[in-house]
Image: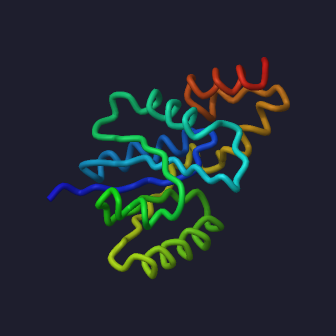
Amino acid sequence: MPRKAIYPGTFDPITFGHLDVIERGSKLFDELIVAVAANPHKETFFSAKERVELIEETVKGLGSIKVKSFSGLLVDFAKKENCGLILRGLREMSDFSAEFQQAIVNRKLSPGLETVFVMTNEDHFYISSSVVKKIVSLGGNVSGFVPKPVEKMLKTKIGQ
């Protein structure tokens, strides 16, 4: 039976840290769904549609990767996709506490749903979407933090 996993996140925007997890996930699983969270209660820089398009452009040629948006509970999306594995990246120890708690809650809501953690490459552990947006808003160069299509779209949105 093919091993399928979901890598969920807001990805606002996708960074090289996210891409590192996606690349490694594509080697660990036969199919990887990058699940873009569309939360109407969370203000994002890019729309869910824009985030999906940016990720699709970024992951071209990486294997069996699908990009889909979802709203609501991740456990419901996982059931809909008939998937029992969640992939999560860890950047630092502070990530672990929140990710561990979320994994336990997900397993309580959906027994059998497992979470697999991978460590982000040390070259990217300091990168976050929030930091990228802050740098761009102040006119800084983010080429070392995000893929080219993302950098271009950020500059277009900010008017640089």
Which residue corresponds to the image point at 37% horizontal and 71% vertical from the top-left? 114
Which residue corresponds to the image point at 47% horizontal and 30% vertical from the top-left? 58
Q: Residue furthest top?
A: 160
Q: Considering depth in this image, is 97 or 104 the residue closer to the camera?
A: 104
As displayed, is residue 116 above or below residue 107?
above
Q: Is 73 left, or right, of 29 in this rendering?
A: right
Residue 131: image x %, image y %? 73, 43
Which residue corresponds to the image point at 43% horizontal and 47% vertical from the top-left? 34
As displayed, is residue 51 above or below residue 122?
above
Q: Quadrant of residue 155 in the image?
A: top right
Residue 28: image x %, image y %? 30, 53
Give the tally of numbered discs: 0
Residue 78: image x %, image y %? 38, 61
The colour style of the image is rainbow
Q: Is 123 left, or right, of 4 in this rendering?
A: right
Residue 31: image x %, image y %? 28, 48
Which residue corresponds to the image point at 64% horizontal and 21% vertical from the top-left? 152
